[in-house]
Image (cartoon, rainbow, N blue to C red):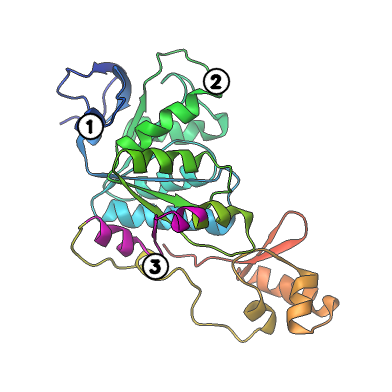
Amino acid sequence: MDRACATCCITRDDPRFPQSLLEIPDPPDALWVEGRLELLQAAAIAIVGSRNCTPMGAHDATAFARALSDAGFCVVSGLALGIDAAAHRGALAGPSSSIAVLGTGIDRDYPRRNADLARTLRRDGCVVSEFPPGTAPHRGNFPQRNRLISGLALGVLVVEAACESGSLGTARAAAAQGRDVFALPGSIHSALSKGCHALIRDGAKLAETAQHVLEDLGWKGALHGQASLPLEQAPEPESPVLKALGFAPMSMDQVAGVTGIPVGAIAAELSRLELSRRVRSLPGGWFQRAPPESA
């Protein structure tokens, strides 16, 4: 079968229309599709999350998506900045590829910063929209398309979401459709963890590893690599500053309060840790332990 196709429109009575969308309460009448049509029938998992994600969140989304792609699951997301884009890239690096569901016409590159990623998806994955070509990015389109992201998938994994995140709408759509909902836990001090924690309180499944997601979906097998392990740095280095610094952002004053080390000495140690790629500096004078480099 050809790996790519020209833009086409498929209706509900077309055998190429995804069976999974026929099972949801409000399937679209038609889909505009560009890319690998066969992916619409593949077993899939959706990964969504914050547009303004942390470096750790982007790393987690990429690592989970790559592990799920390696395990045979296509990854569905919404081509937004942040977690969505990281998930698409991770899945494209594996064998099972990725589907992007747009809130615009299929001929629009939105957001523009993801134009190169969209071209890669059109070539190696699949891009889908229920909106006719030429449709501009109206705000109301994106909540509407979220039901298709969840509808194409067996389950939805939320990585970093604030309490008002649109990703929670995708999770709600998944629950209404009878799909599994998974959420990555985070720091209690991070606003981007609060949406995930709320989902877990409401019954979403806590996912610390890709293996957890796969086992809950009935997948049998073992994963190898970082994404199958708890997402922690190991082993713990000797630096007291690095020991105090968690994956949630902290200021130098906060690190000083934990360690008792003068701020000047902490600044010097943070600079050394940045050079060794163990720490990342964030806007506003915040610092965060860097994620493992390997996926």
Q: What is the distance, in whole Å, between disc 1 and disc 3 at their CAs?
A: 35 Å
Contact, mark 1 vs mark 3 (Cβ under 8 Å): no
- Residue 136 on image: x %, y %: 52, 17
- Residue 269 on image: x %, y %: 74, 77
Residue at image location 37% in from the left, 21% down from the top? 130
Q: Residues within 10 Å of mark 2 (few under 14, many from 20)?
A: few
Q: What is the distance, in whole Å, between disc 2 and disc 1 at their CAs?
A: 27 Å
- Which region shows up in magenta? 198-217
> Disc 2 or disc 1, which is closer to the eye?
1
Q: Which residue is mark 1?
A: 23
Q: Is residue 205 magenta?
A: yes
Q: Which residue is mark 2?
A: 138
Q: Is residue 125 left or right of residue 142?
A: left
Kindly identify which numbered label has been placed on residue 226: 3
Mark 2 lies on a secondary structure that is loop
Dot 3 amino acid type: Gln
Dot 1 amino acid type: Glu
- Residue 272 on image: x %, y %: 70, 74
Quadrant of the snapshot with the C terminus: bottom left
Whether residue 199 is visible to the viewer of this picture, yes or no, is yes
Residue at image location 46% in from the left, 12% down from the top? 134
